[in-house]
Amino acid sequence: MRRGGAGRGLAASLVGTWLVMAALLPSRLQAAPEQFDCRTLADQGTPSSADEWFQRSLWASHCYIYQARAVRIGADGVRSLALSHDIHQGVEREVARFLDGPAVVFERRGRVGRMGWSPSGQAMPASPEGIVDHLEGLYRLQRVGEERIANRHALRLDIEPLDGLRYGHRFWLDTATALPLKQMLIDEQGRVVETFQITELGTPRLHDGEVNLDRGRPPPDGPWSPGWLPEGFIGQPVETRSARHRNVGHRVYSDGLSTLSLFIEPLEDQDLLIPGMHRLGVSHAAVRHRELGGQPMQVVVMGELPPRVLLRVADSVVWQGQASSSANAPPASASQGDDF
């Protein structure tokens, strides 16, 4: 996939995508954060609709303290993991540790995120509140029976896209807590791309207190932006700057379920990717070399989305004052790079 020397700018950003989703901790001068009281979940009745179940699941993922074992099945094989989620002084800490293959540990500390940037200074809704409303017109949510998963009673929830620009999802939610016990990612042709399943869930405990919500963040300044995104995709208020890789621009966009990362950096001989489409596990990465802002740039769009969508986003990127000739045109096919 890579040609030339082993450059670190883009590669490090790709590896760190999962980690940068955590919001920055507040400065000393910042006012006390808004909070959500997890104890209110215990007072709520059983959800009656697919929308209510999904929103309850999103809050449950923030509010329950637990340890679990899980398996992940994808194009790169089967991996087993140990998972934990706890809360300390309103700040969540999630750890995922792979138990086989290369020793890899992911850790995230942060708050409940917002649905998008807050250009007016008024914070957007917390993501669990905003996501379900945002999905209307993009996906169809429906309940599809009940099953037994990880020795627990689970309700199946299917989330089907209303267009061919994103993947579908299936969730099996624990009926006692609404925690997701199993998830499937379904591509535009109905094939299962990835399965993630809890195999053992230690007794989950509802946090007896609050979790912090992230503050509203103004959108970043920058001379470039995507000229086209699938309907419903909006910029995500996550920290993407890196002191080690200042020349790499990185932004994240999501429709609430599907996410793509957009990387832009100057073309350098020691850090070039072959233009075209590349497979990275269950994700794809579209690579383009383009003239932007008067200099050659490398554009990479990565995500669990149909490859043609990633290519179209990469082709649509515009520099301030520079029109895009491809924002409304069908994406070009990948003529180079790895097969997918």
Image (tube, rainbow, N blue to C red):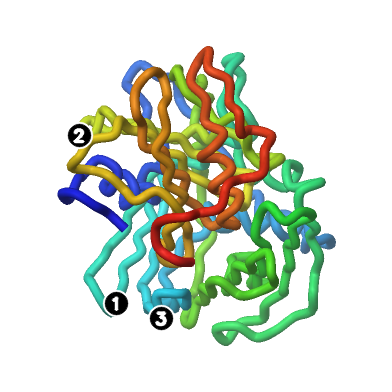
SS at circle 3: strand
- Tell me residue 190's x, y (percent): 69, 72
Calculate the distance from the C-alpha at mark 1 to the C-alpha at mark 3: 11 Å
* Residue 289 in sight: yes
Does residue 24 appear in the picture of this structure?
no
Question: Would residue 78 appear left or right of 271 to someone viewing this image?
Answer: right
The answer to which of 247 and 94 lies nearer the viewer is 247
189 versus 264 height, above or below: below
Q: What's the mark number on residue 99?
A: 1
Q: Quadrant of residue 31?
A: top left
Between the residue at mark 2 and the residue at mark 1, the CA separation in whole angstroms equals: 30 Å
Q: In the image, residue 57 lies at what x, y percent? A: 64, 59
In the image, residue 61 above or below residue 251 = below
Mark toward the start of the polypeptide (2 vs 1): 1
Q: Position of residue 3 (x, y in %)?
A: 24, 52
Q: Amino acid at mark 3?
A: Val
Q: Badge 1: few (under 14), some or many (20 or more) residues near its Cα, within 10 Å?
A: some
Residue ID at (37%, 27%): 26
Residue drawn at x 50%, y 64% as measured from the top left: 205
Q: Earlier in the sequence, mark 2 or mark 3?
A: 3
The residue carrying pointer 2 sits among few (fewer than 14), some (14 to 19) or many (20 or more) residues within 10 Å by Cα, namely: few
Q: Which mark is residue 219?
A: none
Q: Are marks 2 and 1 in contact (CB under 8 Å)?
A: no
Tag 1, which secondary structure?
Answer: loop
Image quadrant in which the N terminus is located? bottom left
- Tag 2's secondary structure? loop
Disc 2 and disc 3: Cα gap in Å? 33 Å
What residue would you read off at disc 3? 78
Residue tagged 2: 244
Judged by depth in the image, the label closer to the viewer, 2 or 1, is 2
